[in-house]
Image: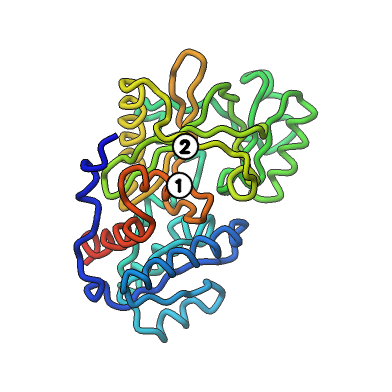
Amino acid sequence: MNARAYESLKSTIPPSDFGRVAVLYGGTSAEREVSLKSGAQVLSALQAAGVDAFGIDVGSDLLHVLLREKIDRAFIILHGRGGEDGSMQGLLECLGIPYTGSGILASALAMDKLRTKQVWHSQGISTPRHAVLASEADCVSAATELGFPLIVKPAHEGSSIGMAKVTSSNELVAAWKDASAYDSQVLVEQWIDGPEFTVAVLRGQVLPAIALGTPHTFYDYDAKYVANDTQYRIPCGLAPEKEQELMELCQRACVAIGVSGWGRVDVMQDADGTFWLLEVNTAPGMTDHSLVPMAARAAGLDFQQLVVSILADSLQARG
């Protein structure tokens, strides 16, 4: 792993050139608690780097706050709906405030797991077979078409919220009902039995892949943010040619969706060695358990350098 290849990601922009930066975090989505932690760490890192940054815990008065405060650009570290789905990006576009991360369309697409899969299918990019669940009859049809085991997912949630692995029709119906409490649109996918990888992208470059291991049934909310027994491997353990294949696949997946600035792609590998794309996150977690900072460290960027690099893209991409 050659950290020199990533030297260009380190920003050389003087902190004063960023102006006054609003870190948008918190919000009202199901991922609020994670966003509060991410936002606190991002804000602290920006201030330590000499950036004139302040935090906004996003609430119903956000428009009033944005109009009242002098803001030169925004660092979006809101997770989930209301921050990662294009709506916040649209508001900032209307106000003429440059921001970090992907634009309106890519944010909206990536937040919608169904639309993401449809785009990937259209590009010939591998993603697990799936069905949409809206009734018990749909559960029966999906079980017949896809077989078991399966994984049920709310279409517009992150952090594995509302997800469940199922191995029978009764479990499938129950999981669909549980997921429906989070989202009116629920997906069910073929379960891919094999190792899981996550790949971060930063300003057009793919960072070293991370292999994930957990004693949980899958990499769920607890494994991501609470448990201390989750395993992270960098280098990821793949043969060099397979890791290159994985990195190129994730680059292609991001280009298809239109991801810019930064993001993270989640991938499974089956017993035959085939990679299967699960989803893209356009405002990934930045907590002490988060994956993008781990990948950045492997590439030679500490947390402060990572945060400033993400912010620098808002200057170069949006003025």
Quadrant where the image shows the C terminus: bottom left
Name above or below for residue 108 compared with residue 99.
above
Name above or below for residue 161 compared with residue 34.
above
Q: Pick whichever of labels 1 and 2 is earlier in the sequence.
A: 2
Residue 186 position, x and y percent, is 63, 40
Q: Nearer the viewer, residue 268 or 167?
A: 268
| Residue at 25% over, 37% down | 2
Residue 142 sits in quarter: top right
> Which amino acid lies under the numbered mark 1 shown in the image of this protein?
Asn
Residue 188 sits in quarter: top right
Residue 101 sits in quarter: bottom left
Check contact, mark 1 vs mark 2: CB within 8 A.
Answer: yes
- One can see residue 41 in this view: yes
Q: Which residue is mark 2?
A: 266
Q: Secondary structure at mark 2?
A: strand
| Residue at 47% over, 37% down | 266
Which label belongs to residue 281?
1
Q: Nearer the viewer, residue 247 or 14?
A: 14
Q: Nearer the viewer, residue 124 or 319?
A: 319
